[in-house]
Amino acid sequence: MTLDPEDSKIITLARAARARNGSAEGAAVRDETGRTYSATDVALTSLTLSAVQVAVAVAVSSGARSLEAVALVTAGEPSAADEAVAAELGVKGLLVADPDGTPRAAGGGR
């Protein structure tokens, strides 16, 4: 599967965040201006968020109004909540990749 270079970039950012924190998931998003944000999942006793939820929250709290793409790097599958938060900000489908960066599904563009 051949990806757009900008989509490859956010997969790389998501992989790096995941590896840096030793997390189960890494995610990265690209907003309407081309800015990127990456994050990992949060698993605290009092707070549990997926990597996609954290990356979207960082983007929105930084002023993003919509997203062009969302990438998730995980051995698992994206949740319905991940799909929903991406869709709310204009993304039709998540870019999902295995931990080694191999894309499994595409469709993260608007």
Image (cartoon, rainbow, N blue to C red):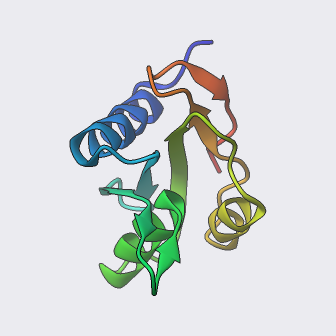
Q: Is residue 15 above or below residue 80?
A: above
Q: Residue furthest top?
A: 1
Q: Is residue 99 above or below residue 77?
A: above
Q: Please report the residue visible at 44 percent of the width from the left and 54 percent of the height from the top.
A: 29
**Which is nearer the eye, 75 or 52?**
75
Q: Residue furthest left?
A: 20
Please identify the quarter of the rendering in which residue 39 is found.
Answer: bottom left
Rendered location of residue 49, percent (x, y): 51, 71
Q: Please report the residue visible at 45 percent of the width from the left and 23 percent of the height from the top.
A: 101
**Which is nearer the eye, 88 or 78?**
78
Q: Residue furthest bottom?
A: 46
Rendered location of residue 76, percent (x, y): 65, 39
Number of numbered discs overlaid on the protein picture: 0
Q: Is residue 100 left or right of residue 80?
A: left
Q: Is residue 80 left or right of residue 103?
A: right
Q: Residue furthest right?
A: 80
Please identify the quarter of the rendering in which residue 57 is found.
Answer: bottom left
Q: Which quadrant does the N terminus fall into?
A: top right
Q: Is residue 92 left or right of residue 21?
A: right
Rendered location of residue 64, percent (x, y): 40, 74
Q: Please report the residue visible at 60 percent of the width from the left and 38 percent of the height from the top.
A: 95
Q: Is residue 78 above or below residue 83?
A: above
Rendered location of residue 32, percent (x, y): 44, 62
